[in-house]
Each structure stands twice: as structure tokens, then as C-alpha cells.
Image: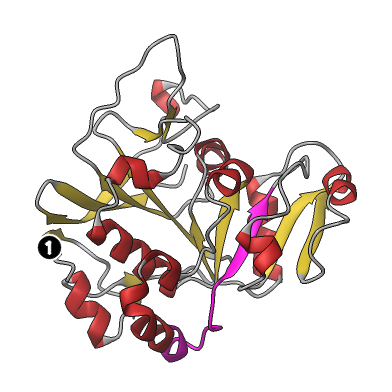
């Protein structure tokens, strides 16, 4: 039985209360989102060490599960956040690291599969959130669960070059070229998904794509599990941190507002509203 305790709460007074009673009891409270009217609501979820590492970047130790030590409450919150999303974004690096798994709520927390399905039905959502893979190059393995198993609808957003590389992808996977160049704009990704009818978007990785989303002002809120690990750093191996390939000058650094803090023992589960610039 997962146990989560709320330490601090400053959610918006307006907006829709999302969670069904079963999930409210597990989450120790409700979730309130206040989505904009002209674009999707985009929220991220990461688990980080105390010094900001999201991946040790070693084979078989690349996912957040290593950072969290498989913490049950982290998995539960991940499942809850997936259960209220129209779609879930993975970058190519995240997909390669975790391609054995679908990005469904029950895949990360099977114990509440019935509650997650009830939650989605209550919100009028599809049985599973749509998986969105972002890869400019199209150089991704095609044997991952999101493509080969086709348990959930999958969309690959890519370039014209990437679409050419992905022609042999599973027939149920929708491939959309949103640029003729080599770079995929975070704003273009958001607009494409908005035009396709997606209103709530969960961003699950990775840190390089996250840097793009932050720098373009596309992230509305961040959910962040803080693990009591310290990863350190050295010149021998590059650990991936929350934001990669993107550095903000002090005068342009992105500020955020604390919305909530929850805990179970040594783990902290935080939520921040990201200030738009």
C-alpha cells in the first residue's frame, strides 16, 4: 500500500478537480489543473537526485527507476499523472532507455489499473494516453513497446528526413513530419498536438528535449520527485541532469512557484508552476 503525506499545498482555487475518490485517497489530496484556452496544458514529471541528476547514463542504469530505487510512491504518482493526460511525450533518448515499457498508468503501477481506467473514463479520455515520440533523425529502434506492441496509440513527430528513416515502423504508428530541417521546435510540437485535439500533455523526458521545452516557454508545471541520493560528477562519465544542452544566463533563468510538497519517508514529491518569460 503506497503512503503519501501532504506537507504543503498551494494549488489554484480555480480549475477542474481531476481525481476520483480512490486516487485522492492514495495521493492525499486532489489535483487541480487550470488549462489555458488557446493551447494545451503541458506538465512534466521527473525523478532527480539531490544534486539534480536524472540518469546515470550507463547501460541498464539509464532510467529514473535507478534514481528512485523503484520507490512505490514515485511509481504511484507517475501513474496518477499519466491517468489524467491526453498524451505523453518521450524523447528519443528516454524511449531507447525504457523501450520495453508502454507509457500507460498501469504499466508503472499495476495495482491501481482499475482505478486508472475509471479515472480516464470519468474525464472522458481514451483508455490509454497516446504516446508521442519525438525524434528529428528518426534513428530509433523499432522493437520497443510503443511501436512494436502497439498497446496504445503512438505518434512519432519527426522531420522529413526522419520520416523517411521510419517508413518501416509498425503499421499502427502514425508518423508526422513537422519540419523540413534538422531541429524540432517545442512550440511546433505543442501546436501540432493541440491541432490534433490533445489538451493535457505530460512530458516524461528526456533532459535535452526538456531544455528545448523550457527555453521556448512550453512547460506550464513541473512535478519532481527528489530522491535522497547524491550522484556527484567527474570527467570520466557524464551523468544526465534535469536540463541538458541548454544554459540560461542569470538574468534569464527560469523561475518557478512552489505548488505542493508531499512525502513518504526520505522521498519528496514536489510540484512547481513555471513562470512564463
Looking at the image, can residue 18 be seen?
no
Is residue 22 inside the magenta stretch?
no
Number of marks present in the image shown: 1
Query: On the picture, is 175 further left or further right than 32?
Result: right
Tell me the residue at 64%/56% (across/down).
Answer: 144
Which of 144 and 88 lies nearest the eye of the viewer?
144
- Where is residue 231? Give x, y as percent: 29, 26
Disc 1: CA contacts within 10 A as few (<14), some (14-19) or many (>=20)? some
- Where is residue 77? Give x, y as percent: 30, 63
Query: On the picture, is 247 further left or further right than 29?
Result: right
Which of 111 and 216 lies nearest the eye of the viewer?
111
Q: Is residue 42 above or below residue 244?
A: below
Extreme-top residue of the structure: 235
Q: Which residue is mark 1?
A: 6
Query: On the picture, is 234 further left or further right than 189?
Result: left
- Where is residue 120? Give x, y as percent: 45, 83
Magenta segment: 120-134
- Where is residue 46? Give x, y as percent: 38, 48
Location of residue 100 (image quadrant): bottom right
Is residue 127 inside the magenta stretch?
yes
Location of residue 112 (image quadrant): bottom left
Looking at the image, can residue 133 be seen?
yes
Quadrant housing the N terminus: bottom left
Location of residue 48 (image quadrant): top left
Q: Is residue 274 above or below residue 181?
A: below
Query: On the picture, is 138 further left or further right than 259?
Result: right
Tell me the residue at 45%/17% (across/down).
Answer: 237
> SS at mark 1?
strand
Which of 27 and 2 lies nearest the eye of the viewer?
2
Amino acid at each position: 500500500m503506497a503512503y503519501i503525506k501532504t506537507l504543503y499545498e498551494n494549488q489554484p482555487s480555480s480549475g477542474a478537480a481531476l481525481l476520483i475518490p480512490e486516487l485522492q485517497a492514495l495521493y492525499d489530496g486532489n489535483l487541480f489543473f487550470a488549462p489555458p484556452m488557446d493551447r494545451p496544458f503541458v506538465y512534466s514529471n521527473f525523478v532527480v537526485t539531490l544534486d539534480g541528476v536524472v540518469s546515470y547514463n550507463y547501460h541498464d542504469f539509464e532510467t529514473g527507476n535507478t534514481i528512485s530505487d523503484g520507490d512505490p510512491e514515485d511509481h504511484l504518482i507517475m501513474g496518477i499523472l499519466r491517468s489524467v493526460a491526453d498524451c505523453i511525450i518521450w524523447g528519443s533518448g528516454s524511449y531507447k532507455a525504457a523501450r520495453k515499457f508502454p507509457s500507460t498508468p498501469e504499466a508503472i503501477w499495476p495495482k491501481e489499473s482499475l482505478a486508472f481506467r475509471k479515472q480516464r473514463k470519468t474525464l472522458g479520455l481514451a483508455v490509454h494516453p497516446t504516446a508521442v515520440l519525438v525524434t528529428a533523425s528518426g534513428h530509433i529502434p523499432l522493437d520497443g513497446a510503443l511501436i512494436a506492441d502497439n498497446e496504445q496509440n503512438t505518434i512519432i513527430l519527426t522531420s522529413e528526413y526522419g520520416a523517411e528513416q521510419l517508413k518501416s515502423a509498425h503499421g499502427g504508428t502514425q508518423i508526422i513530419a513537422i519540419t523540413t530541417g534538422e531541429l524540432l521546435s517545442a512550440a511546433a510540437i505543442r501546436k501540432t498536438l493541440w491541432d490534433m485535439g490533445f489538451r493535457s500533455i505530460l512530458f516524461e523526458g528526456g533532459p535535452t528535449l526538456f531544455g528545448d521545452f523550457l527555453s521556448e516557454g512550453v512547460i506550464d508545471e513541473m512535478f519532481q520527485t527528489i530522491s535522497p541520493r547524491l550522484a556527484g560528477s567527474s570527467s570520466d562519465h557524464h551523468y544526465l541532469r534535469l536540463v541538458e544542452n541548454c544554459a540560461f544566463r542569470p538574468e534569464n533563468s527560469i523561475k518557478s512557484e512552489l505548488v505542493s510538497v508531499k512525502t513518504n519517508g526520505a522521498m519528496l514529491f514536489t510540484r512547481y508552476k513555471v513562470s512564463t518569460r
